[in-house]
Image (tube, grey):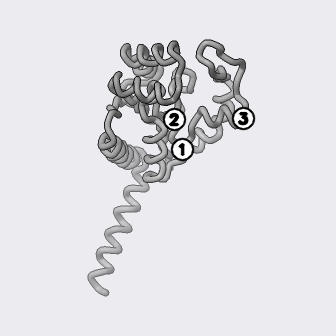
């Protein structure tokens, strides 16, 4: 059976973590926050004084995640995506947020003026969407809005429907077996 891997990406503050965790809890897929993995494994190669954050060692992150990605059944959450191997993902979801909403979210996080401005500019110019488009096949790319709380539910339902279709298309034996099982249960219930 082929297990699905999903990437959720987008500018910081668009709601990747909220969506990823909730999607994992409803789908049974494993949630991986790359920022947390990097922090736990000290997968850095320096510190950026301007943005006041550690610099991710992308090669170490890829090495750290390789086995989990090969097993499948994973949701990966990270703001960038061009360093992940294309073969890892069956679907890439880029979250987008209105600039005024994003500004408030990042301001609440305490981002310095430069970091805040650059992230807003990144969202305005769709930098991460373009990065994803250059890194992955167009047919696995999806762009989702994430401005209001009710959009979270819509996005989860949309991804779950897509996931169900993907599983049916890529695991025909599983679908055939499940249909046979459902038929047997239905038939047996008539005689009980």
Q: Position of residue 59 (x, y in %)?
A: 67, 23
In this figure, which residue is indicated by the disc labeled 3? 41
In the picture, residue 63 is in which quadrant? top right
Q: Residue at x 71, y 18 (%)?
A: 46
Instruction: Mark 1 and mark 2 in contact? Answer it, CB < 8 Å.
Output: yes
The image quadrant where one finds the C terminus is: bottom left
Q: Position of residue 89 (x, y in %)?
A: 49, 34
Q: Residue at x 36, y 49 (%)?
A: 164
In the picture, residue 174 is in which quadrant? bottom left
Instruction: Say above or below: 78 vs 163.
Output: above
State the count of labels.
Answer: 3
Instruction: Say above or below: 136 vs 190.
Output: above
Q: Residue at x 39, y 26 (%)?
A: 102
Closer to us: 61 or 38? 38
Assess disc 3: are there few (<14), some (14-19) or many (≥20) residues with their C-alpha within 10 Å of its C-alpha: few
Q: Earlier in the sequence, mark 1 or mark 3?
A: 1
Assess disc 2: are there few (<14), some (14-19) or many (≥20) residues with their C-alpha within 10 Å of its C-alpha: many
Left or right, 99 with respect to 81, comes to: left
- Mark identifier at residue 77: 2
Instruction: Say above or below: 153 vs 13.
Output: below
In this figure, which residue is indicated by the disc labeled 1? 31
């Amino acid at each position: 059976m082929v297990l699905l891997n999903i990437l959720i990406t987008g500018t910081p503050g668009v709601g990747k973590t909220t969506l990823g965790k909730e999607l994992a809890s409803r789908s049974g897929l494993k949630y991986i926050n790359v920022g947390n993995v990097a922090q736990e494994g000290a997968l850095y190669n320096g510190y950026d004084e301007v943005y006041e954050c550690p610099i991710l060692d992308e090669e170490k992150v890829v090495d750290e995640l390789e086995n989990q990605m090969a097993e499948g059944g994973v949701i990966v959450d990270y703001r960038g995506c061009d360093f992940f191997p294309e073969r890892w993902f069956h679907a890439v979801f880029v979250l987008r947020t209105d600039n005024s909403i994003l500004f408030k979210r990042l301001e609440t996080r305490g981002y310095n003026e430069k970091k805040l401005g650059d992230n807003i500019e990144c969202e305005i110019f769709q930098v991460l969407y373009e990065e994803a488009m250059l890194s992955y096949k167009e047919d696995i790319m999806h762009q989702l809005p994430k401005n209001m709380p009710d959009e979270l539910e819509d996005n989860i339902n949309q991804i779950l429907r897509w996931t169900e279709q993907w599983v049916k298309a890529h695991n025909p034996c599983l679908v055939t077996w499940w249909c046979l099982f459902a038929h047997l249960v239905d038939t047996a219930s008539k005689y009980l």
